[in-house]
Amino acid sequence: MSSHALLYVVVAVVAWAVSWRLKNARVRRALMLGTSYVLYASWGLLFLGLLVFSSLLNYGFGVALSRRPSGAILAGGVVCNLALLGTFKYVPTILPLLPDASVATAVAAIGLPVGISFWTFQALSYLFDVYQGTAPKPSLSEWLLYMAFWPTVLSGPICRLSTLHPQFRDWPTPSGEDVGRGLDRICIGLWMGALGQVLATGLRPGHGVDAAFDSLSRPWTGLDVWVAAIGYGFQLFFNFAGYSHIVIGAARLFGIRLEENFDRPYLATTPSEFWTRWHMSLSSWIRDYVFLPFAMLRREMWWRSVALMVSMIAFGLWHKGSVLFAAWGAYQGLLLVLHRKGQGLQRRFPWTAPGATTALLSWLITFGAICLGWILFRANSVSQALTMWRVVVTPSQYVRPLLPSSLYMAVGACVLGYFGTVGAISWYRRRRAPLTVSFGLRAALYSVATYAGLLHAAATQAFIYFQF
């Protein structure tokens, strides 16, 4: 088990045990704030200093905006946040292009503060909401906890103050249901993290998705590209959705309910539906604070397409300031624009087909297009991504696969397991029959999940979104 994972488990268990004895909401907030700062400081005292500085700075901007909603004050807050984010996240990326790289070299030596993209966007959403008059008025302790809440500060979900503020202010004692649901979510998250790790490293060393992208020296074949793209898509899903389950479960143990971050995204039948199901906290943030304000500047339909493209490029650059991530965002924006154009053609030239056939074809096209996009998200270079795409559209390249058969088996098992599990859950929901698990079986599942997650996944690979 990694040292950070062990520290989080020990500190979280102690804080949870102590919180049960505390009846005052203010004292609970103080305990959670102290716990959050201790855990975040384990990544570096300088990082903690930056988080506290950003928190106090944005609290000051929020107070000023609440007193006088001014565009100049809002712009100042946005510039300060983006400058702090850009200094640590994007300056090192352009380091080779600078004539005098001394300052940039010093910034790069510090490293990227963990979670800076997430807590910066939380601060920005607060400033926008205050300016619009829709934000609650937190106390300083509530605000500091919102910015540093230990389950979410590292890799989200990106929270809104309007969701957390009422819970922080009137912090209830967690119920038995909260504890049970929280443990269930953590168990699911650990399982998913372990599955993501299996896909990354393979059933045998060097036979995983990472090796497929990093170590393949022979020419790609069409099937190799598809299995690598689909495999990475599910690796990313299991890794990040698993982390989100753990975070939501950990917060639930303390009586705090967070918004969902994933909702069966690979069942989406259109690109628009996919982005309402995948990384939902960031998708809704981009929609509310980038796309809608930008789209409302003009009424023409072509301007909405421009707004979609700009929004999704911003989505990509949020992850990393590189050509590949900008291209990935532009690709996703193009999918959304084409979907809108297709809807317009359907309204002008209506045609009918069997419902099941249409849904299946729409799902297949969406799934394939999204998976091809993951190539841009994961490729090591633009040339590698273009090579993989060229192979996909070349019929003569669909020859005998070169990647290990064990990778094909792992990807196939994970894909079938995902859709099988989703189908089984949907069947239970349609029957409206409660799914009950005995205490003994639940304890066994918890034990196995703890072993699979903490002793395997956490020991070998950090969660992917820590790098963002």
Image (cartoon, rainbow, N blue to C red):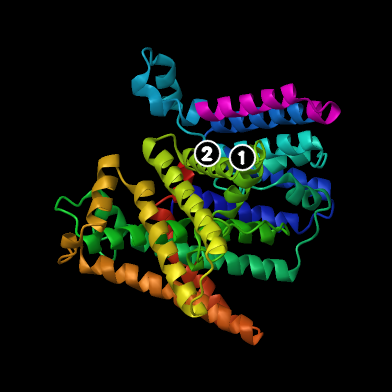
Identify the magenta region: 63-86
Residue 130 among those drawn in magenta: no
Residue 285 can be seen, yes or no: yes
Residue 383 position, x and y percent, is 25, 41
Q: What kind of residue is marked 2?
A: Val
Disc 2 from disc 1: Cα separation: 8 Å
**Dot 2 corresponds to which residue?**
310
380 relative position to 101: left or right: left
Tell me what residue is drawn at x 43 percent, y 50 percent.
462
Tell me the element at label 1.
Answer: helix
Q: State the mark number for residue 115.
A: none
Residue 10 position, x and y percent, is 57, 53
**Dot 1 corresponds to which residue?**
290
Q: What kind of residue is marked 1?
A: Val
In this rendered view, identify the residue nearer to me: 95 or 249.
95
Residue 13 position, x and y percent, is 63, 57
85 relative position to 64: left or right: left
**Above or below, comparing residue 136 to residue 179 in the picture:** above
Work out which quarter of the rendered image holds the N terminus and state it.
bottom left
Tell me what residue is drawn at x 50 percent, y 62 percent.
270
In this rendered view, identify the residue nearer to me: 118 or 349.
349
Q: Main secondary structure of the magenta part?
A: helix
Q: Counting other residues with Cα less than 10 Å from the Cα at mark 2, is it few (<14), some (14-19), or many (20 or more)?
A: some
Tell me what residue is drawn at x 47 percent, y 53 percent.
338
Tell me what residue is drawn at x 58 percent, y 48 percent.
282
In this rendered view, identify the residue nearer to me: 323 or 183.
323
76 relative position to 337: left or right: right
- Farthest residue, direction front: 349
Residue 37 can be seen, yes or no: no
Tell me the element at label 2.
Answer: helix
